[in-house]
Amino acid sequence: MQTPHAFLRNVPIFSGFNDDHIENLSKLVKLQTFKGEEIIFNQEDKGDALFIIQTGRIKVSLFSEAGKEIILSILKEGDFFGEMALIDGEPRSANVTAIDPTELLILERIDFMNYLKQSPDLTLMLLIEMSRRLRIADDKIGSLALLDVYGRIARYLIKLAKAEGKITKEGIVIVNRPTHQEMAGLVGTSRETVSRTLTDLQKRGVISVTKDEIILKEDSIEVMEDKYLIYK
Ligand code: CMP
């Protein structure tokens, strides 16, 4: 296993820290492990720490009264969460749950605030990442308000293919694809609708789906953009 120092050295928000700062930080963080599907904290909880993901994945989500889940984001190794409640003093803005077995490094509020006050580099990196997250959130609001479920699923697949897809002779391959349940939470629909839409897109020859992969055919992005997206 990596030492906290070696791991923190490669965490983007701490990229402006020198070795002494990283050493100091690695002494302040505490490691905590969570099982897959374990709740890390709930919306409205009091926030007293920042979390950095050392291994595993977590989801940030909201639930309706009826228990329907919308996933705001899935975060992975090297990402951080829990900064909002520390910065504005409000309760946690969303629920956070481990997807896989997950190791988190936890930094207490007081230590995080001290670093923030001392380090313009950390503040800038934080602002850059928070702006990136706001852009993604704006995009999600746009999709929910302007696209039907076909459009939202098509848009999600296109984004995933562009961000993580591998180009092969069969098409763009999305490996380690999200489950239908995860996709449903991410695009704001039900698991059944995701399954039906993927089957339909498959019948139309736009994609092919296996247990672990989704493959977008050569001209699928153009076809989906023309057919399902009213904005790009
Ligand atoms: P906090 O409000 O303390 O607790 C929930 C955390 O989820 C929040 O801080 C952020 O770190 C994270 N979070 C909230 N909304 C989003 C979002 N739209 N995208 C990514 N992360 C988010």
Image (tube, grey):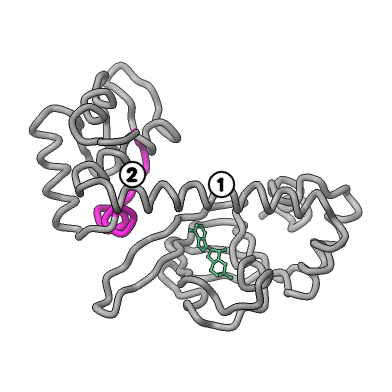
- Circle nearer the N terminus (2, 1): 1
Q: Which element carries disc 2, helix, strand or loop? A: loop
Magenta-drawn stretch contains 180? yes
Residue at figure coordinates x 8%, y 33% from the top left:
203
| 115 relative position to 176: left or right | right
Q: Quadrant of the C terminus?
A: top left
Q: Amino acid at mark 1?
A: Arg
Q: Where in the figure is residue 205, as x and y percent of width and height? A: 13, 27
Residue at figure coordinates x 37%, y 43% from the top left:
176
Residue 70 position (above or below residue 132): below
- Characterize the local packing of mark 2: few (<14), some (14-19) or many (20 or more) Cα atoms within 10 angstroms: some
- Whether ligand 1 has any atom under 8 Å from the Cβ at mark 1 is answered as no
Q: Nearer the viewer, residue 220 or 179?
A: 220
**Based on the displayed image, in which of its 4 quarters is residue 63 positioned?**
bottom left
Magenta-drawn stretch contains 131? no
Residue behind mark 1? 132
Q: Quadrant of the N terminus?
A: bottom right
Residue at figure coordinates x 34%, y 20% from the top left:
168
Cα distance in 3D space between marks 2 and 1: 22 Å
Q: Which residues are magenta?
A: 174-187
- Whether ligand 1 has any atom under 8 Å from the Cβ at mark 2 is answered as no
Q: Nearer the viewer, residue 102 or 107?
A: 107
Q: Amino acid at mark 2?
A: Arg
Q: Residue furthest top?
A: 169
Residue behind mark 2? 177
